[in-house]
Amino acid sequence: VQLQASGGGLVQAGGSLRLSCVASGLSFDDYAIGWFRQVPGKAREAVACIDKAGSTYYDDSVKGRFTISRDSAKNTVYLQMNSLKPEDTAIYYCAADKSIILSELRNAVQYDYWGQGTLVTVSS
């Protein structure tokens, strides 16, 4: 299983970015996908997750600004990030798991597969 995250970069506060996570080596429709972020010295935290049925979880800090979606034809999960804030600066990782249930989506330890991360920097 491989997860390839991309789309990070430098953006000014109020701007937008779209992250992509391309999955290979798995039956994409059978997996939940989560986006997590981490800054140095802090634990990895869930940002937005989507299960195989399309149900979603969003952290309160990104509700109304971020949207997660999945495209089965492309084996890709997207994270559209709008109205970015400096506190959104982090390395963003995507992760996949086959057996995770809705109530566990936000729990990083439940995910079996992780991508390499993409850096998002939001300047003030």
Image (cartoon, grey):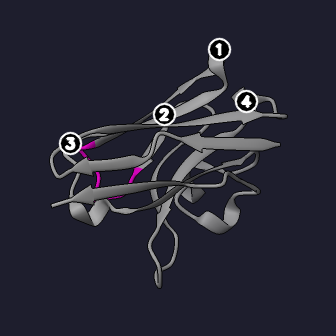
Q: Which residue is mark 1?
A: 73
* Label 2: how many Cα within 10 Å (few below 14, some 14–19, many 20+): many
Tell me the CA gap for discs 2 and 4: 14 Å
Nearer to the camera, 65 or 98 = 65
The magenta segment is 58-65
Q: Which quadrant holds residue 105? A: bottom right
Magenta stretch: helix, strand or loop mostly: loop
The residue that disc 4 covers is: 28
Distance in Å between CA atoms under marks 1 and 4: 9 Å
| Percent of width and height locating residue 120 | 39, 54
Badge 2 is on which residue?
78
Determine the residue positioned at 21% across, 57% down.
85
Q: Is 84 positioned to the left or the right of 95 in the image?
A: left
Q: Which mark is residue 15?
A: 3
Mark found first going from the N terminus, 1 or 4 = 4
Q: Residues within 10 Å of mark 3 (few under 14, many from 20)?
A: some
Q: What whole-number distance in Å separates the C-alpha atoms at marks 2 and 1?
A: 13 Å
